[in-house]
Image (spheres, helix red, strand yellow):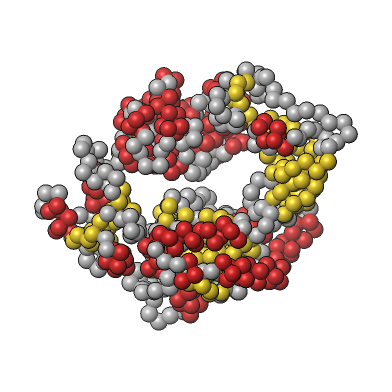
Amino acid sequence: MEAENLELITADSPSQRVGAKPIDDYVKIEHTVKMLSLANAFTLAETYDFFEKAAKELDVDPSSLDIFSEPKLDGLAISLHYVHGLLSYAATRGDGQVGEDVTHTIKTVKSVPIKLATDCPPATLDVRGEVFMPKAAFEKLNLQALQNDSKVFVNPRNAAAGTVRQMNPKIAAERDLQFIPYGLGDYGELKFTRHSEILKFLHTIGFRKNPHCYSFHGSFEEFEKNYHVMEKVREKLPMQIDGIVYKIDDLSLQTALGFIARSPKWAVARKFPAQNDVTQLLSVDFQVGRTGVLTPVARLEPVFVGGVTVENATLHNMDEIERLGLEIGDSVEIQRAGDVIPKVVKVVAQGADRKPIIMPERCPVCNAAVERTEGQAAFRCTGVLTCAAQGAERIRHYASRKFMNITNLGTKLIELLYNKGTLKTIADIYTLKIDDIASLDGQGEKSAQNVLASIQTSKTTKLGTFLGALGIYEVGEEGAKNIARYFKNLDAIAAATLEELMQVPDIGPVMAKNVVEFFHNDNNQAIIKKIRDAGVTWQDEPGAPVQPQPLAGQTWVLTGTLQHLSRNEAKALLESLGAKVAGSVSKKTSCVVVGQEAGSKLATAQSLGVKVLDEAEFLAEFNLGH
């Protein structure tokens, strides 16, 4: 009927769960509120210590904290965005700030309401939760795969993640994915005082409950009791869990604590113990990474550990091998916890025909000399730009989804182009032609056009993203963003001294030294110039560092709606004065600037005795009258 009468199709029609066509590519979505990851604890002592530190910062006794525990579902974090009660889009976590639009597959999940079960829905609502595959559905999926002689999934989490990222929603609809919420992102004018209230609210508007959630006071004994309860029910649950999430229930205390980097200071994931088994070390290979570091990798007699058949394990470096007293032929204990790469824990028994593990003198990829970095455990290939392992990996890093997001330029294609000599540096990406790609095995003109389209799209980026994409040793995603925010433009970063770089928040001497050395290298500067000449652009961060900066070392918070400045303008202004602008209020906050309809941040500031200014007072304080 809808096919014949298109005007009858509504957003919450049952047909919309499986009615979408396969998509060609993923669209990026910026989260309205950052999606955080949880810090991990692996013992009772670590768990208690986490909340003991939180209690100390709040100046309260740990046992007075109300703790809420819920099973940590082993799936994929998703944000559901509703507008006036109707599902608008669904997005993955991504880097926490920007995720991928997966609405086409999430609509097929029956436990995700297309329309909220309320007569008075909020204007907008971001529901955060976990998409997972129940154990029974996982077993059914793998049984079908075996019958069809297809590849099986190693665990339910991989199966859920793979299903969500299917281009074709009809395939996703055939698999019994489930969704259970664990909180909210942006919830507009709604008012809550506790996390447990949020979960009750979500249940009333149509979402499933997470089984075995408990509330208790934060004493050592109560954490211990809760853990043993969950350990017993773990195997009986219909879904796989890999731990327990503990949260401070009081939302005002959550706000007071805030977060660091990507993790909240009011919640932690207590992971279940790693699973171990014993096998034999057959050989050791040395892999060359993007930065030239040679990493020893153990090749093992296959053993089933933690739901996965393990054949390889990291040995980290030669110091670790020496510490273990490890040689080829030994029987070793292997440990695997969650998604952590399997590692060799200890030597269980020495082999009869042991052979020592020796670091090669020449790079196994390019045959350049291998040297040990002074003062470090790392051995590096000296080939740098001539080493294929480093060159191809640098290009892959640059083009990855996390950085320049050249979606159709994948690892396999990069290796083909690199081995052919078409791609030698990241700058060569922007000189690729259709024939360079279409002439390769397994490629065609349509594939080549898609790659060139992705390259063209990537030319508009952000300064922090581009800086991270350059692959400067030990400068990760967050470090690159911090440097970009501080210096505002690439020329200032390139000219920065070691001392100036060390003024950037969270940037230490090693990272600062690596940045200086990178930009003092003529080859690197030449490559950057080629990229910019090819049309890669970004907007410089607003403003410029002001000297002197009267708010240097201070932390300010903005809340409510300002009349004369946008939130971004106010943030840029504060940063130009040297302040760090945080998203939450704590005892360490220097000042809170409040606009109209200020929320809980104002109340928290008042309760903690933090200085508060309205917009007029803020502008007057720095002679910025409007």
Q: Position of residue 462 (x, y in %)?
A: 37, 41
Q: Residue sitting at 43 percent across and 50 percent down?
A: 261
Work out whether residue 466 or residue 500 is closer to the camera in this orientation and state it.
Answer: 500
Work out whether residue 423 or residue 296 is closer to the camera in this orientation and state it.
Answer: 296
Q: Is residue 567 left or right of residue 294?
A: left
Q: Residue sitting at 51 percent across and 72 percent down?
A: 217
Work out whether residue 150 or residue 216 is closer to the camera in this orientation and state it.
Answer: 216
Q: Residue furthest bottom?
A: 119
Q: Position of residue 276 (x, y in %)?
A: 74, 51
Q: How many marks?
A: 0
Q: Position of residue 403 (x, y in %)?
A: 46, 41
Q: Is residue 396 left or right of residue 508?
A: right
Work out whether residue 484 or residue 609 is closer to the camera in this orientation and state it.
Answer: 609
State the image quarter where residue 323 is shown. Answer: top right
Q: Is residue 222 left or right of residue 266?
A: right
State the image quarter where residue 585 is shown. Answer: bottom left
Q: Is residue 543 left or right of residue 427?
A: left
Q: Residue sitting at 22 percent across and 66 percent down?
A: 596
**262 shown above or below 481:** below
